[in-house]
Amino acid sequence: MAFISDRLARIKPSPTIAMTTRAADLRAQGRDIISLSAGEPDFDTPENIRDAAKAAIDAGHTRYTAVDGTPSLKRAIADKFARENGLDYAPAQITVGTGGKQILYNALMATLDDGDEVIVPAPYWVSYPDMVLLAGGTPVVVECDQASGFRLTPDALEAAITPRTKWLILNSPSNPSGAGYDRAQMAALCDVLLRHPQVWVLADDIYEHLVFDGFAFCTPAQVEPRLKDRVLTMNGVSKSYAMTGWRIGYGAGPEALIKAMAKLQSQSTSNPCSISQYAAEAALTGPQDYITDSRAVFQRRRDLVVAGLNACPGVDCPVPQGAFYVYPSIAGLIGLTSAGGTPIDSDEAFANALLDETGVAVVFGAAFGLSPHFRISYATSDAVLQDAMARIRRFCEGCN
Ligand code: PLP
């Protein structure tokens, strides 16, 4: 009998964290490494939020709180949904966890029985399939290629639904592709879902505020109110307010689901950090300038990176609507050999050779379920991005 559980054997460690760690190891050995693999803003948390956290400590808000969030934070979240999304959620329909990640985990653990299916459009955020597997479910991966804008089509959704389908996970704008669904595209998916009452939607809106060129963000519960009682709308402060380390995410949905998720949290982590909850409340209720300021910076970097990549032979990079990632194709490099002698027979070989020969760390597409691609996170300075683009270009020019 193995000591480590079968349950754990179903999943693998996060490939994005593995790549970031490999880059850090090489840097520690003295190599000149540029890591474009981590998914977090490079800015400091805004000052008003940091001040709120300090004040919370001094006011003694350092004890256990209600398991899934303080009443005042839930109120601030309800107000946010009303103000920004036109969604009416009562505080009892809101749950707060240790990052959006815990909200997703709680939802899947609280609802999946063995063999239940979850539709996961690819390219996907690396944690979705593994969380589904951990909960005993079966991820049903639907490839959404570059030609379809990396978006799930209504026909592909219809074809993937079975009587065992419990959830569809929708992430707009997407990690890793940056693709966002506009209202018409979202409405078309909702129309399909209306015909299948057993299917719920997990809307991962964590990149809501990182949208460019005036793209209008929308979320399923808002686009199709008739679906609202089978949608979990998930969001958090990590990406919108440069608060990845504070670990606050939240979800809103039908009360029975929210209660089930809180029950799970009560027997696992209990409340998210009390100080972070006060900081998150300040983020949601305070000045929102950071959002517009950072959006402008990210849009400039996106343009820099898209232009830089499209200047590389063999690389084809579409322009994403949001998030801080691009997901270019390297179909034009497959079958070639790098200057250092590595056959580029997969996107994993490409990413490894790129790191070894140029010191640029990216994450290969197979990790996100759609090849041959790679993901760049452009949440770093223009100077670093320019250096990275020049290195990637030299690498691609050296392939033959
Ligand atoms: N969802 C997506 C698509 C993400 O990229 C991330 C973080 O990388 C998360 C959810 C979780 O974010 P957090 O747990 O920091 O709120």
Image: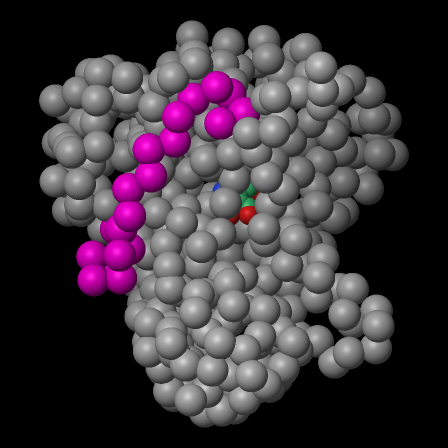
What residue is drawn where x is 12% and y is 22%?
A: 195
Residue 168 in view of the camera = yes
**In the depicted structure, whether residue 89 falls above or below residue 356:** above
x, y percent for residue 187? 16, 39
Q: Quarter of the image for the N terminus: give it.
A: top right
Point out the stretch of residues depicted in magenta: 133-151
Camera-nearest residue between 5 and 145:
5
At x 65%, y 51%, the residue is: 17
Seen from the viewer's position, the closer of residues 181 and 221 is 181
Residue at 52% x, 39% y is: 127
**Residue 19, x across and y down, in percent:** 64, 59
392 within the magenta span: no
User: How many numbered marks, from 0 up?
Assistant: 0
Residue 287 in view of the camera? no
Where residue 267 appears, x then y in whole percent? 68, 10
Q: How is the image coloured?
A: one colour
Indicate left or right for 60 with 113 as reference. right
**Residue 383: quadrant of the picture:** bottom right
Q: Quadrant of ligand 1?
A: top right
Q: Position of residue 136 (x, y in %)?
A: 48, 19
Q: Is residue 144 magenta?
A: yes
Q: Quadrant of the C terminus?
A: bottom left
Quarter-of-image position of residue 74:
top right
Q: Is residue 92 above or below residue 85?
A: above
Left or right, residue 35 beside residue 81: right
Q: What residue lies at 70% left-to-right and 46% top-to-bottom? A: 245
Which quarter of the picture shows residue 275? top right
